[in-house]
């Protein structure tokens, strides 16, 4: 449905992956390709959150997904790097 995409962001910066989505049931997968934790947040009929450690991946599925964001959240210094995609 969307992606794959790649993001690079500074610490505490939030990057919207999708906004104002139509509310379809969907899953967002993130692969942390850097050395700093990233946080994936999803919103839909509820909310979901997952911290993705360096070199790991996670998927959050959300009924009626309307938005997804990534935040460079790690206590480590440096830039965050991640790839993502969204599927139904």
Image (tube, rainbow, N blue to C red):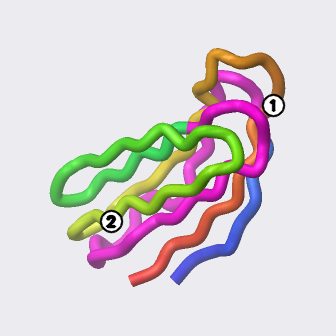
Task: Assess disc 1: are there few (<14), some (14-19) or many (≥20) residues with their C-alpha within 10 Å of its C-alpha.
Answer: some
Quarter in which the C terminus is drawn: bottom left
The outermost residue toward the left is: 45
x, y percent for residue 50? 42, 43
Eyeballing the image, is 87 above or below 70? below
Tell me which corner region of the image, top left, top right, bottom left or bottom right, holds residue 14. Answer: top right
The answer to whether residue 53 is left or right of residue 21 is right
The x, y position of residue 30, in whole percent, is: 58, 58
Compared across the picture, whether 46 is left or right of 6 comes to left
> Which residue does the numbered mark 2 point to in the structure image?
61
Residue under the image location 52 percent in, 64 percent down: 29
Residue pointed to by mark 1: 79
At 35% from the left and 74% from the top, the residue drawn is: 26
Q: Report the front residue among 55 and 23.
A: 55
Q: Determine the secondary structure under disc 1.
A: loop
- Could you give the CA–CA distance between mark 2 and mark 1, rounded to whole angstroms? 26 Å
Q: Earlier in the sequence, mark 2 or mark 1?
A: 2
Residue at 62% from the left image edge and 43% from the top image edge = 15
Q: Secondary structure at mark 2?
A: strand
Q: Does residue 35 show up magenta in the picture?
A: yes
Q: Quadrant of residue 71?
A: top right
Give the left or right position of residue 50, taking residue 33 as reference: left
Pointer 2 and pointer 1: residues touching (CB < 8 Å)? Answer: no
Q: Residues within 10 Å of mark 2 (few under 14, many from 20)?
A: some
At x 63% / y 16%, what residue is drawn?
A: 75
For the magenta stretch, what is the residue range? 10-38
Which disc, if any, is residue 30?
none
Q: Where is 11 relative to 5, above or below?
A: above
What is the x, y in percent for residue 18? 51, 61
């Amino acid at each position: 449905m969307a992606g794959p995409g790649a993001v690079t962001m500074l610490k505490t910066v939030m990057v919207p992956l999708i906004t104002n989505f139509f509310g379809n049931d969907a899953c967002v997968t993130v692969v942390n390709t850097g050395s700093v934790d990233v946080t994936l947040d999803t919103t839909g009929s509820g909310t979901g959150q997952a911290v993705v450690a360096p070199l790991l991946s996670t998927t959050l599925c959300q009924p009626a997904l309307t938005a997804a964001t990534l935040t460079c959240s790690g206590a480590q210094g440096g830039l965050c790097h991640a790839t993502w995609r969204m599927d139904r």
